[in-house]
Image: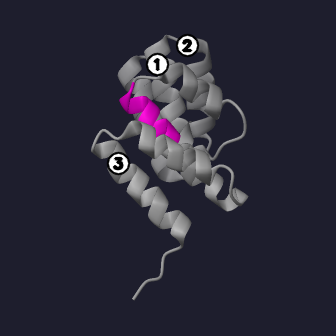
Amino acid sequence: MMVYSDERLLAEIALAGILAGKYKEAEAIAAWLLTQDTRYHESGKLILVTSWHACQKYTEIVHLLSGSCSSSLLPFKALSEYHLGLNHNLKKTIKILKSDENNELTVFAEQFEKDLFL
């Protein structure tokens, strides 16, 4: 039997809440996770950007992810920059993703760039 931390269970509940349209509740959980140990900050940011993307809060996503963030969150930043028409920033984000060691992020960046004719 797997044992999950309370923080992980809350993160999973928050992500399920987003699917059910419970954005404020999910964001409250994310805000709490961001006040906890730094190992939970990426989960908190993931919940926020997922909720904000569903609500088309692209400016908030770009602002949150413009500081230090995991490269696994950068596809959200790229999508938000695209929706906001921030092509100069988008090209920089794609370049970072293409140079990442994670093959899935590299493939995402290359396909996104190809689809957008950047």
Q: Amino acid at mark 3?
A: Gly
**Residue 106 horizontal/vertical position (percent):** 51, 43
Residues at discs 1 and 3 in contact (Cβ within 8 Å): no
- The tag earlier along the polypeptide, 1 or 3, is 3
SS at mark 1?
helix
Task: Return the disc, 2 or 3, that comes first in the chain's sequence.
Answer: 3
The amino acid sitting under disc 2 is: Leu
Which picture quadrant has residue 66?
A: top right
Image location (x, y in percent) of residue 89: 61, 19
- C-alpha distance separating marks 1 and 2: 6 Å
Viewed as shown, does residue 45 lie left or right of 37?
A: left
Mark 1–mark 2 CB contact (< 8 Å) = yes
Residue 68 place in picture, x, y as percent: 72, 40
Question: What residue is disc 1 on?
Answer: 82
Front residue (pair 28, 85)? 28
Give the residue number, with chain letter if any, for mark 2.
86
Q: Residue furthest top?
A: 85
Where are the magenta residues, as a range?
48-55
**Circle 3 residue:** 17
Q: Amino acid at mark 1?
A: Tyr
Q: Give the residue drawn at x 49%, y 34%.
A: 76
> For the point 66% across and 43% down, which residue is it?
69
Dominant secondary structure, magenta:
helix
